[in-house]
Amino acid sequence: MADINIGVNNGLFTVTLDQWEWTGLTVNGTPVQPVNQGNVQFQFTQTGSPAPVHFKAVANQNIDIVNPGNTLFMKSRDGSQTHMSMISYSEANGVVTLNGYLHSLPFPFSEDQPSPLVFSQGRMTGTFHT
């Protein structure tokens, strides 16, 4: 079962894909090289100043798209910000693509939920957390 883990710390994002099903990760247009460390196949850790992140995770046909995309609004640890994760899914020629957009907003939303937040597809789980 494929797993994607999206973390945020001080406004900087981390995207981690486990070793199952995932075949590629691109962040802000740059391919991420596999790390193959334990259960981790791909990992991106944002450095520098907080900024929006667009990523594309590619998987084989073992993930079934059964749920619509989603937008998650998560409270920051101190409650002063909103961390947003927008996820969409597509499938073509036996390849499943997850497109994500991550952004930290400098104010809270009334729709904010506490960490962790979860999302899923058939044979895929995802976590968005602080």
Image (cartoon, helix red, strand yellow):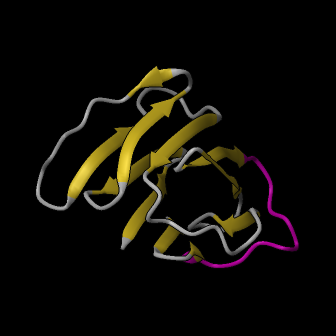
Q: Look at the image and say whether residue 7 sits in the magenta stretch.
A: no
Q: Look at the image and say whether residue 111 sits in the magenta stretch.
A: yes
Query: What residue appears at the point 43 percent right and 52 percent down from the top-left corner?
Result: 60
Q: Locate residue 33 relative to residue 5 in the image: left or right.
A: left
- Residue 35: x, y in percent? 19, 40
Q: Is residue 112 above or below residue 9?
A: below
Query: What residue appears at the point 35 percent right and 30 percent down from the top-left corner?
Result: 32
Outermost top residue: 30
Q: Locate residue 59 relative to residue 42 in the image: left or right.
A: right
Q: Is residue 44 above or below residue 5?
A: above
- Residue 112: x, y in percent? 77, 72
Q: Nearer the viewer, residue 46 or 122?
A: 122
Query: What residue appears at the point 67 percent right and 67 percent down from the top-left corner?
Result: 74
- Residue 1: x, y in percent? 36, 74
Query: What residue appears at the point 50 percent right and 70 percent down from the top-left corner?
Result: 127
Outermost left residue: 38
Q: Locate residue 23 relative to residue 64 in the image: left or right.
A: left
What secondary structure prevails in the magenta region?
loop
Q: Is residue 90 above or below residue 53?
A: below
Q: Locate residue 14 relative to residue 50 in the image: left or right.
A: left
Q: Is residue 68 above or below residue 34?
A: below
In this rendering, the count of numbered labels is 0
Quarter of the image holding residue 122? bottom right
Which residues, given as a range, are shown in magenta?
105-117
Quarter of the image holding residue 76? bottom right
